[in-house]
């Protein structure tokens, strides 16, 4: 979890009377993501967050599965996937399983409605763009290279993400900071690859005590339902706690390097009960005089491995383009492509930036994946 944070006004004692200067009683909300035993925040609203004016219907957003002809590796040239819609409708899911969905998002319209993912944490990776995510906790500034962690249940609206490019990881299991990074009191360890200073919560809380007709989309699993509210959902005067959206820039990741090749778990950044998120960033590589810095050949027996390529020169891979994504399937070998294994001997640093997902459950591909699937990829290791 990120560190304790407080913004705006909160009463000295929780669950007690808290009023505005003119005597109006604020409405307290306890916002936890794992019952009453997980991390939580407490927010104070001008109006009860339960007030709904009208039900405006629901729409299905289930990904359309695509069954490839047989089990094989994939290289998806996701830069070719068309955008379209706001930051909610522009989600193009390419891979999914029961716990996680991976999507490309390139909005071409601003969001009109507010949005809340009621069933999943969202981790947005900003490929291109800079702006603000307005949330019930305040405005969250983001820039290229940021992971933007949005806990489930957070009401938000991108201020204007038109033309920005994102990878979106949507997880039904909570996404958290690995437990091994923290001491028994919850502080990030001296040996962790980032510190509390690298995590950035909301910058400013702007309270909107406004009446009107505000539409809110709430996503649960494969459906988005729309509600009309009488009051602006960002009517919070203050909050505190540990559960709030924050950003972490991949360039702030401090890679652990070694005498010989360090495997993916050495680069873990966030985790869930069903997959890990790993950051590969520019770094000095192995200093054993005979080291082979490129990864060895391997087959992931228990996991499907996805890599989003962000930038730089990739030490083990040829033919990577804008927004390439590879899926290395369990039970099949993968590793450095021709020339890259021996070619890595003697190098001192690599310039690559990528994000890897190691998932326990197999991924299903979708129609969006089919359209940009490079069917020759399986043969790309032939010498
Ligand atoms: Fe691998």
Image (cartoon, rainbow, N blue to C red):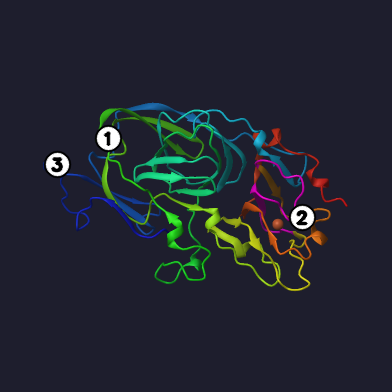
CA distance separating discs 3 and 1: 17 Å
Whether 82 is drawn above or below 41: the answer is above
335 horizontally vs 228: left or right: right
- For the residue labelled by badge 2, is the local secondary structure a helix, a strand or a loop? strand
Across and down, in percent, residue 149 comes to 47, 49
User: Does the residue tagged 1 have its C-beta within 8 Å of any atom of ligand 1?
Assistant: no
Please give the residue where the numbered disc 2 appears in the rendered image.
334
User: Does the residue tagged 2 have its C-beta within 8 Å of any atom of ligand 1?
Assistant: yes
Whether 19 is drawn above or below 180: the answer is above
What residue span does the magenta drawing correspond to?
299-323
At x 67%, y 66%, the residue is 262
Asked where in the image residue 52 lies, by quadrant, the reply is top left
Q: Is 302 contained in the magenta span?
A: yes
Q: Which mark is residue 148?
A: none
Q: State the count of labels.
A: 3
Q: Which mark is residue 51?
A: 1
Taking depth in this image into account, of 213 and 248 the one nearest to the observer is 248
- By secondary structure, the bulk of the magenta-drawn segment is best described as loop
28 horizontally vs 73: left or right: left
Q: Which one is in front in this view, the residue at disc 2 or the one at disc 1?
A: 2
- For the residue labelled by badge 3, is the local secondary structure a helix, a strand or a loop? loop
């Amino acid at each position: 979890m990120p560190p304790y944070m407080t913004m705006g006004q909160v009463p000295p004692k929780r669950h007690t009377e808290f009023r505005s200067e003119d005597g109006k009683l604020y409405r307290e909300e306890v916002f936890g993501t794992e019952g009453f035993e997980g991390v939580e925040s407490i927010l104070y609203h001008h109006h009860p967050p339960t007030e709904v004016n009208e039900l405006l219907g629901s729409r299905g957003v289930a990904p359309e599965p695509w069954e490839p002809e047989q089990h094989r590796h994939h290289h998806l040239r996701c830069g070719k996937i068309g955008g379209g819609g706001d930051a909610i409708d522009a989600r193009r899911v390419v891979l999914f399983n029961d716990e996680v969905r991976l999507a490309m998002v390139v909005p071409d319209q601003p969001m009109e409605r507010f949005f809340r993912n009621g069933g999943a944490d969202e981790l947005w990776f900003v490929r291109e763009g800079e702006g603000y995510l307005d949330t019930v906790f305040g405005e969250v500034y983001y820039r290229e290279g940021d992971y933007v962690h949005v806990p489930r249940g957070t009401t938000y609206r991108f201020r204007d993400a038109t033309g920005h490019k994102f990878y979106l990881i949507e997880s039904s299991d909570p996404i958290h900071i690995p437990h091994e990074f923290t001491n028994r009191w919850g502080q990030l360890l001296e040996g962790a690859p980032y510190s509390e200073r690298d995590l950035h919560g909301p910058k400013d809380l702007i309270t909107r005590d406004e009446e009107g007709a505000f539409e809110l989309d709430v996503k649960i699993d494969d459906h988005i339902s729309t509600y009309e509210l009488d009051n602006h959902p960002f009517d919070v005067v203050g909050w505190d706690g540990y559960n709030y959206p924050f950003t972490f820039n991949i360039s702030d990741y401090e890679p652990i390097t070694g005498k010989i090749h360090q495997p993916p778990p050495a680069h873990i950044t966030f985790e869930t009960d069903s997959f890990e998120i790993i950051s590969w960033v520019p770094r000095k590589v192995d200093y054993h005089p005979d080291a082979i810095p490129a990864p060895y050949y391997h087959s992931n027996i228990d996991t499907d491995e996805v890599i989003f390529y962000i930038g730089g020169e990739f030490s083990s891979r040829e033919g990577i383009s804008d927004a390439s994504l590879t899926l290395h399937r369990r039970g099949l070998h993968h590793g450095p492509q021709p020339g890259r294994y021996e070619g890595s001997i003697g190098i001192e640093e690599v310039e690559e930036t990528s994000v890897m997902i190691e998932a326990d459950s197999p991924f299903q591909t979708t129609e969006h994946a089919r359209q940009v699937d490079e069917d020759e990829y399986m043969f790309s290791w032939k010498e």
